[in-house]
Image (tube, grey):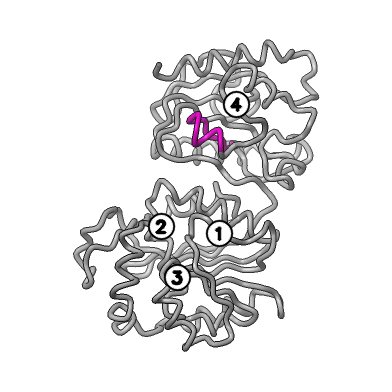
Amino acid sequence: MDRSTVDIYEDRGWEWAAHHPPVQRSDALAFARTVPVGALRVDLGCGTGRYTSDLGAPCVGLDAARAMLERCRSSAPGALLVQADLEALPFGTTTLHGGWAHMSYLHVPSGRLPAALGDLHRTLVVGAPVEVQVLAGDHEGDALPADRIGGRFFAAWTPQRLSDVLVGAGFEVGTVVTTGDFVRATAGRARTLSDVVGPGMQLLVVGLNPSLYSADVGVGYGRPGNRFWPAALDAGLVTRDRDPGHALRVHGMGMTDVVKRATSNAASLAPAEYRTGMARVERLVRWLTPEAVCFVGLTGWRQAVNRGARAGPQQEQIGGRPVYVMPSTSGANAHARIDELSAHLRAARAMTKP
């Protein structure tokens, strides 16, 4: 989260809480009914605990400000309280069965929200319900006119972009509703991969769709027989095997998929999924502006853009950025050698700025 905002909550959280009574308790109670009885759920950015007790038990109240947690201890005495950042959740993989985030992720810079929601995806079991409410609009910064406390950072969201980020983070979106100044989304944790994307990407790598194996291990191209990571290492795109987070942070290589639905093979994907997925990828590229985009496998590009496309640089762009299309790195594409795949990846990287 924005650290200066956390400091403001430490110093003046009581003032904020005094002017914000719980007005959505019915929504919190309804959310509690979607989580299995006795299963662990989390109030993300619980603040003073306005809704924590309504979310059912057992419930973790998580907040970055200790002062807010001290007040939550009084209003939700049965909650398990944790001081932590929304961008670095201290929970094990698939340990939570529901996540409620009421006006908390709006304190995360927009370009970092995909990673934050991807971390939430990691902590949840498949099918776990999630509700996220944020500020509506296009504001981003610490000068929000309606902020009576002043100085806090806010990132506002349009329904389309919030929906796109949730889908990219690995959630099946149910409803996205704008009410007044707020956008509220309901979703469920899907059996799929989260995007690994953010600002400052040099190369965005786009797969067709995750395999069930990759979805379960949480790493794109994760199956041992897939040649993507050996080829990426050989090409110098990455320096760690099967570590997409390191690839993004250190080498500026992001990862997403045309279709987020994981399958055992691509044969079950429908044409409409390609078109819908490519539209999301285009919006993602326009938003985060990677220097170039590389599609791994020709199927997605051929299905949604150019049926006659061949491997190599493409005449068409996506989101205003140059595109390279390369052969699939799947073990099923055995005739494509690792040295050939490496050459394609080097050629894709050559389309980025030196």
* Among numbered discs 4 and 1, the one appearing first in the sequence: 1
Q: Which mark is residue 192?
A: none
For the residues bearing labels 2 and 1, Cβ distance under 8 angstroms: no
For the residues bearing labels 2 and 4, Cβ distance under 8 angstroms: no
Give the image location of residue 238, x and y in percent.
Answer: 58, 26
- Identify residue type, mark 1: Leu
Q: Quadrant of the N terminus?
A: bottom left
Q: Which mark is residue 89?
A: 1
Q: What is the spatial separation of the Cα atoms under label 2 and label 1, in whole angstroms?
A: 11 Å
Residue 223: image quadrant is top right
Residue beneath disc 2: 1
Label 2 secondary element: loop
What residue lies at 56% left-to-right and 29% top-to-bottom? Answer: 205
Q: For residue 251: magenta?
A: yes
State which mark lies toward you, 4 or 3.
Answer: 4
Residue beneath disc 3: 102
Depicted 6 relative to depicted 23: above or below: above
Label 4 secondary element: loop
- Identify residue type, mark 2: Met
- Identify residue type, mark 4: Thr
For the residues bearing labels 4 and 1, Cβ distance under 8 angstroms: no
* Among numbered discs 2 and 3, the one appearing first in the sequence: 2
* Among numbered discs 3 and 1, the one appearing first in the sequence: 1
Residue 106: image quadrant is bottom left
Residue beneath disc 4: 239
* Among numbered discs 2 and 1, the one appearing first in the sequence: 2
Decide: few, some or many residues near mark 2? Use Cα within 10 Å; few <14, some 14-19, many ≥20.
many
Over which residues does the magenta segment extend?
246-257
Q: Quadrant of the C terminus?
A: top left
Depicted 318 relative to depicted 38: above or below: above
Q: What is the spatial separation of the Cα atoms under label 2 and label 3, in whole angstroms?
A: 15 Å
- Identify residue type, mark 3: His
